[in-house]
Amino acid sequence: MSVIAAVAAGHHRRVYEAVVLKVLGATRRDVTRAFLIEYGLLGLATAVLAAALGTVAAYLVLTRIMHQDWTFLPGATLSTALLATLLTLAVGYAGTWRALGAKAAPYLRNE
């Protein structure tokens, strides 16, 4: 949920960036591509870190506390990381959709 909170907190910044980029000549497609790259990298970095920490935590809990055998499941790890990255992209784009349609004048006057 912290990724969703971060997306919501940065909405004003995203609207302002979209407005400035559009004023400088960027198309809606260019702005969308830039935001999707940003969210894709954010989701991928978060997924890799979470997978690494989760794998280490699972290993320690199973072998040290529960005294069980541990088996690494790369398929489950990769599919979870992919799903988390796609979810970050979807939530990020949903939060950016309104920014793409924002009119430039009100935002530029207030800055």
Image (cartoon, rainbow, N blue to C red):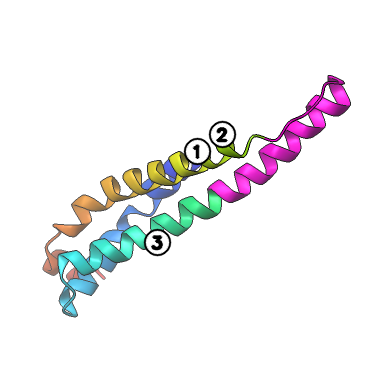
Please state which amino acid type lies under the numbered disc 2: Ala
Q: Is residue 107 left or right of residue 17?
A: left
Q: Amino acid at mark 3?
A: Glu
Q: Main secondary structure of the magenta part?
A: helix
Q: Is residue 66 above or below residue 25?
A: above
SS assignment at label 3: helix
What x and y, as percent, mark residue 16?
Answer: 27, 65
Q: Which mark is residue 69?
A: none
In this view, the residue farthest toward the bottom is 24
**For the point 79% across and 25% down, which residue is it?**
62
Image position of 66 (left or right of 56): right
Q: Residue 79, which numbered label?
A: 1
Residue 67 lies within the magenta run: yes
What residue range appears in magenta?
A: 47-72
User: Residue drawn 50% across and 38% down?
Assistant: 79
Crowd rating for badge 3 (residues with CA inside 10 Å; few <14, some 14–19, many 20+): few
Q: Please identify the quarter of the rendering in which residue 77 is found.
A: top right
Between marks 2 and 3, how big is the CA–CA gap? 25 Å
Q: Secondary structure at mark 1?
A: helix
Task: Report, in whole angstroms, how far the alpha carbon at label 3 lies from the one at label 1.
Answer: 21 Å
Q: Which residue in the protein does label 3 denote?
A: 38
Could you say where residue 76 lies in the image, as x and y percent from the top left? Answer: 56, 34
CB contact under 8 Å: marks 1 and 2: yes
Residue pictured at 29% horizontal, 50% vertical: 93
| Residue bearing mark 2 | 76
Does residue 18 sit above or below 64 in this rendering? Answer: below
